[in-house]
Amino acid sequence: MALPDWSAVKSLEVPTLAELFARDSRRVATLSADVAGIRFDWSKTHLTPDLIAAFTRIAAEMGLVAKRDALFAGEKINVTEGRAAEHTAERGEGSPDSVARAQAYHARMRALIDAIEAEAFGPVRSILHIGIGGSALGPDLLVDALGRDAGRYEVAVVSNVDGVALESALDRFDPQTTLIAIASKTFTTTETMLNAESAISWLMQGGVADPYGKLVALTAAPEKAIAFGIDETRVLPFAESVGGRYSLWSSIGFPAALALGWDAFEELLEGAAEMDRHFRLAPFEANAPVLAAFADLYYTQVRGCETRATFAYDERLRLLPSYLQQLEMESNGKRVTAEGQPVSWPTAPITWGGVGTDAQHAVFQLLHQGTRLVPLEFVGSIEPGDGLAEEHHRQLLLNMFAQGAALMAGRANDDPARAYPGDRPSATLLLDRVDPRTLGAILAFYEQRTFVNAVLLGINPFDQFGVELGKEMAKAAGAGGQDFDASTSDLIARAFG
Ligand code: F6P
């Protein structure tokens, strides 16, 4: 198995951003792409045609084309777990069998949604979605971004085992008109099962005669959901080969499909499929996920950047940074290759971010003048999400554009405290509007970019063994049978006596 050789990209002389713009009047055209209602602009990154060519050679050595084909063909590219990664089949881009299976599961979900809308379960006003990680972050983002004006159902997504989270959602809802979706790929996750039990108690205490009749399961382990007591007709399965953090396209997207409407859910899938086709067919030098990954790798491998930040200049996308944290860090936060050899190069940077303009008044000081280089990504929408005076949205976008320009240009000053070094990179993703299609496309873009990064890093993005040890130790702590270190034992004794 090939290992990545970064020497060619490290040896290239890369001019400053100002010089790159001065030398090439076509830079914006060369380093941007328009896909599925999204403008991608990497011209304010240090990517150059030479760098792209060098990364393209690394991509060839690492077998990117074959691995991309294997991904879409449903081959077992998740080698450490011996299974395929078939999230693209959920949006119609995969092996014919897997696409047909996904469509059948979607049809099942749609039939249940139709029944809910026809009040087969009595009047339903609220959906309590219980899940964690990939079983919560995607649906939460979709409903928060697109559901503000939908007004069909009130949706609460509860993930934390901290009872404060569940309690505050339950306080808002009426047990008589609430449906509870229990979302868990494995249907064993401690937090989700405990929250589900407490929500069932709440239904009982609220006088619901058949609380289990108000439950829907979203899972790749349907037999476990049935054993839990949920009727098979309200168990919405998805394939084991769909990873948790890639699962919002499956029945895990149920609250979004219900709250936003089935047509919106289909548009979301279609937007994602459009991005998949672009990823499959566009040449690397015009391929959005590929170019984004090349820029990522330039900053981590060559410039030593340890973090990358995404700022959503759109309140509707305020959950995007948290969603990306799981997608990128759980996928590519690895220290061995897919074959188990320790890596000697950095893998995923730390993903962080926030919402503009708020972040400008909190963390941008470090971005402009700190000692660390942080590649940024700005995400905004041309069409506003509000009905207030146009000035709000104008100010929002002008601020986003100005930040990218200021970071790049910098400003000299005789007083060092007031000088800005400049030459700080940012990419801009400008959506025509925030709608199901563009959201589907941008999320598929992030998935594919994560995949390209993984292929060039030589790692498997589809497992997550790193989360297991902490889970096991929490269980052991609960069972009381394990000897912990002195600090942990002291803390346990203080909390529980
Ligand atoms: O602990 C990490 C993880 O396994 C994630 O990968 C996953 O999205 C989350 O837990 C929830 O898992 P499940 O959907 O099986 O409840």
Image: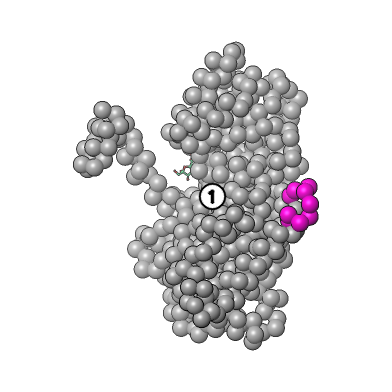
Q: Splitting the image into 4 quarters, where does residue 32 fall?
A: bottom right
The figure's colour scheme reads one colour
The residue under the point 34% across, 63% down is: 342
Rendered position, 344 above or below 185:
below
The N terminus lies in quadrant: bottom left
Rendered-image quadrant of the C terminus: top left
Near-viewer residue (228 or 11) = 11
Q: Is residue 219 left or right of residue 439?
A: left
Vertical side of 495 occupied by 414: above or below: below
Q: Amino acid at mark 1?
A: Ser
Residue for point 49% across, 64% down: 366
Looking at the image, residue 347 sits to the left or right of residue 223; the answer is left
Is the CB of the residue bearing disc 1 within 8 angstroms of ligand 1? no
Residue 376, image x, y percentages = 56, 65
Q: Secondary structure at mark 1?
A: helix
| Residue closest to the eye, 325 or 210 | 325
Is residue 318 visible in the rendered structure shown here? Answer: yes
Identify the residue at the far front of this view: 415
x and y percentages locating residue 262 in the rendered image: 74, 39
Residue 461 seen anywhere in this rendered image of the structure: no
56 to 362, vertically: above or below: below
**Residue shown at 49% from the left, 24% from the top:** 198
Give the labeled residue for mark 1.
322
Residue 50 image-quadrant placement? bottom right
How many neighbours does mark 1 have within 10 angstroms: few (below 14), some (14-19), or many (20 or more)? Answer: some
User: In the rendered structure, which segment of residues is drawn in magenta?
Assistant: 385-393
Q: Residue at x 45, y 34 (%)?
A: 161
Q: Is residue 168 magenta?
A: no
Residue 29 percent location from the top left of the image: 71, 76
